[in-house]
Structure formats: structure tokens, C-alpha cells
Image (spheres, helix red, strand yellow):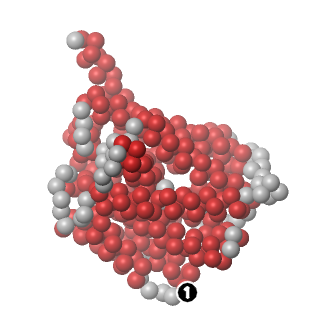
Amino acid sequence: MKGGKIWSTVVDYFLILSAIIGVGFASGKEIYVFFFQFKNMSLIGVIAFSLVFIYLFFIIDYIKYKLNIGSYNQFNAIIFKKLCGLTNVILIINFIITSAGMLAGADYLFITFFNVGFRLPSIVLCLLAYIIVTGGIDRVKWISNLIIPILISVIVINSLTNITPQNVNLGITTKSCVLALVYGLLFGINNFVAGLPVMFESKLKAKGKLFVTLTVALIIILNILVLASNTFVSDMPMFELSKNVSMSFYYIYFITLILALFCTLLICNYNVNKIICKDKKSKFVPLITILSCFALSNLGYNFIVKYLYVVSGIFSSIYILSLIILIFIKLIKLKKQQKNK
């Protein structure tokens, strides 16, 4: 994608956002699970999420600069050394599970919305993802810059319309501050994993990454306030609440959810392609990846969310915690080397 510095920053901003903001935000379910149960303590979770994002953004940037790292695979090899193969397998499993959830979610949405049981939506999304991923990062950036502004706008409109002074009440919870803190950190870790390989495809500076964090935190807070005013549990609460705006907006929100599903599917498949193919282009690897995701999606949306997402979350947590520890060790070694010079 061509353009000046400002345009390049905007493009990279939406690219990283596309790896973080997906159907979990648009549906409201992810926010409900990680934040709403803590009511007033939810804000502590949002702060914890923001801090972990800022820390990971800046510490990885620092390592990239100090060691002159140009790609995710190079970064992974330097940090994890002999274990880099194992960490790659963990991330690939994570991304495939997430992708399968996106495909199953698309079918679930169509069945719910149209009351028709067929797999055409997931087949179409698979085909589109394959075409875009094989076209390289420029196509991925183009789609991200098309979808993410629409996604953010629709979520914000839905939130603001459903928030009124009369019905917003976070309430007081007796649940511990520590638990809210842990959930916020877990949310940050789970969402950062998808954005890590993509970070190496962007040149977004410190201010841009802070703006990414603020954007995500704002959407989380808006969703918390919306769910506080309508305390119910469903698979896609924000989607159901979009009816309160208008029936036309309800249909728009349906399309937005499909776009959110596709955006996450696209990023996850691109990440797998980059990990396996390194800096080479391949048409075979994306094909195998998307077919694997499609096969796994046959387990169904509810099964994937209830069981496989737990596996994915555990893998993400192990990976990021190991990453933080090893980066800390690497920083200590770098400081010792600088002192000895």
C-alpha cells in the first residue's frame, strides 16, 4: 500500500487492531466473560489489560531495536532458541482453533438469523481468506483498513445508543480485586498473541501503539456499560441489543459480525502462513491451514467456545508468560554485555 507517513501509520494502526478486535468485541460475549462479572472491579481489569498491552508492545519494540530483529520468526528463534519449534506449534494450534471458531460462528450466525442449516458461509469465508492470505501482507492490510473502521463505528454506535443515565449501573461486587486483575491480564494475554506476528509486519511507532491500547480499552468500557444496563447471558449479547437501535441497524450489525469473524479468521491464517513459510510465499500451506480450520469447525460453535477455547487460552498464557520471562532474562544479559564493553 502506497502513501505518505501519515497514511502508512493509519494502515498499520488498523492492521494491529484487526488482530485484536474481532467477534469477541462485536458480540460482547468475550467482554462479558472477562469483565462484567466483576462489576465495579471491571475497571481494574481494564487497567490491567491496558498495562500488559503497553508493556508487551514496548518491551518487544526495545528488543527488536537492540538485536536488529526484522521478522517474527527471527524474534521467536532468538528468544526461545531450541524451543522455538515447540512454541511455533503452540501458536499454530492456537490460531487454528480460533479460526475454526470463526468459521463455526459464521454458520451459527446464519442458522440463528435465517433459521437455515447449511455451511455456505464458512465455505465462502474459507475461499476469501485463502485468496487474500496468498496475496501477501498488502492484501491483508487492505482488508483490515476496510473492515476495522466499520467494525469500530458500528460497535460504538450500538454502545452509545444502549447506554442511558437511567439504566447504567455497574453495581458493587464482593469479588476480589485480585481476581478482576487476573482476568484482565488473561484477556490481554489471549488477545496479544494474535497480534504478535502481525506486529513485525508494521512500522507503527510508540504513539500509534498507545492509541491502539486506548481504542481497545474504550471499546471494552463501552461494552461493559452496555452489558451493565442489560444483565443477561447469551452467545452474542451486543448483537441482540442492536435491535434497540432499529431493525435496519440490526441487519447492519449482523453483517458487521460476519466481517469481524472474517477479520479474525484472516489474521490467524496469515499468522500460521508466516510461521510455517517464514519469508517465502506459498499457496499450499494456506490451503492446508484453511482446510484444517474448516474440518475442525465441524465440531460446532458451542463446543469450540466451551472446550477448545480453554485449550487455546492455556496455550496463549503459557506462551506469553514464557515470553515475558525470557525477554527479561535477555534484557539482563544485554545490560551485562553493555557494561563489559
Q: Position of residue 153 (x, y in %)?
A: 56, 59
In the rendered structure, the answer to whether residue 243 lies left or right of residue 152 reads: right
Badge 1 marks a residue whose secondary structure is: loop
Coordinates of residue 152 in the picture (x, y in percent): 54, 58
**Among all residues in the image, which is located at the extreme front?**
4
Q: Quadrant of residue 326?
A: top left
Percent across and percent down for residue 231 are 72, 62
Residue 280 seen in the figure? yes
Residue at x 36% of width, y 36% of height: 60
Question: Horizontally, is 43 left or right of 316 in the view?
Answer: right
Residue in front for this viewpoint, 292 or 128: 128
Question: What's the residue at 57%, 70% (across, down)?
Answer: 253
Q: Quadrant of the C terminus?
A: top left
Give how far across and how far down residue 248 sits, in percent.
63, 76
Split into 4 quadrants, where in the image is the N terminus? bottom left
Q: Which residue is mark 1?
A: 115
| Residue depicted at x 19% and y 56% | 277
